[in-house]
Image: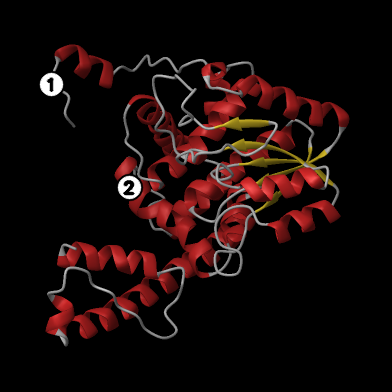
Amino acid sequence: RGITEYEDVEEFFDTDFSFCDPYLIVDMEKAVDRINSALEKGERICVFGDYDADGVTATALMYSYLSNKGADVMYYIPDRVTEGYGMNCSAIDKLNRQGVKLIVTVDNGISSIEEIDYANSLGIETVVTDHHQVGETLPDADAVIDPHREDCNVHFKEWAGVGVAFKVVCALEKGDYFDVLNEYADIIAVGTVADVVDLKDENRAIVKYGVAKINSNPCNGINALRQVAGVGERTLNAVGVTYSLAPRINAAGRMESATTALKLLLCDNLVDALDIAEKVDLCNRERHTSENEIMEAAIKHIESNEKLKYSKVIVVCGEHWHHGVIGIVAARITEKYGK
């Protein structure tokens, strides 16, 4: 991990870790003021998420927190195939018809310049919370929470989308990290490891608390997911979470609808959670089958064409390959052929 100094080793393993003040992140006060204003006025809020595990867990975290605070809150996750990543004007029209006055994005929004302008034209305000790299122009939102902004000088910037949402929730709770972790650490940890961010500094601390909660007192959805994944009786570590829980949440967004996985994480009783977890597990099995079929077809095509196999760039295509799976197959081909 590149840690060579004794002091750095001690810090890496520090069990009394201190999270940084969330208000050090640029625009945090603006975000908190706007969300609290919506809470006080009873304005309808929409948590606008993403279909991967990071986005789903971030949506679950923000929606659950606002719901517990008595907000008039709903959620929206775009469809991977028909809508693609991030905000879109058609979705904003739907939210407008449903009376939404404030959109809070999680794991997206930093590149939604035109979409947020369109929302503004309809009288819908936006708070962006994202962790992706910032472009030349910031969206014209009420607040833009993204640690990668050039004017954001926090010492650590490598949170997943759910990690940034966690910082916002902590700010809404006046900086009380441990109450938030006590309630949501399992969900935050799953999203963090699923997004393959470096497990150092705050990410390492988040996952440490989250894994402990996953093993001792998980929410109903994660408890059910452990049962269907066959790891209900095992003590999981971060690797176990990465290979048993995260892929199943991702699979729902790949093969069916990420809303299924979101409903699982929001489920308030174990019986219903087990039923939804079975559907999520079926999505994962279908994902695995589809992935292997596409991989087999792709390799067969590559191996039958030496010019393609030894070219600097390999491009493979096929009919009826599932859009939710081709990214995984591309990564496996890259690993196999080294290009």
Q: Nearer the viewer, mark 1 or mark 2?
A: 1
Residue topped by disc 2: 240
Relative depth, front residue between 14 and 169: 169
- Left or right for 117, reference 148: right
Residue at the far top in the pictured view: 7
Q: Secondary structure at mark 2?
A: helix
- Residue type beneath disc 1: Thr
Label 1 packing within 10 angstroms: few (<14), some (14-19), many (20+): few
* Observer-nearest of 136 and 325: 136
**Which amino acid does the dot numbered 2 rest on?**
Gly
Residue 267 appears in the picture as rendered: no
* Residue 291, above or below 205: below
Image-quadrant location for residue 338: bottom left
Is label 1 in a helix, a strand or a loop? loop
Q: Are marks 1 and 2 in contact (CB under 8 Å)?
A: no
Residue labelled with disc 1: 4
Q: Earlier in the sequence, mark 1 or mark 2?
A: 1
Rendered view: 338 above or below 99:
below
Q: Is residue 1 left or right of residue 50?
A: left
Name the residue nearer the viewer: 33 or 242: 33
Q: Is residue 43 left or right of residue 92?
A: right
Q: Is the image coloured rainbow, by chain, by secondary structure, or in one colour?
A: secondary structure
State the image coordinates of residue 1 (x, y, percent, origin top left). 18, 32
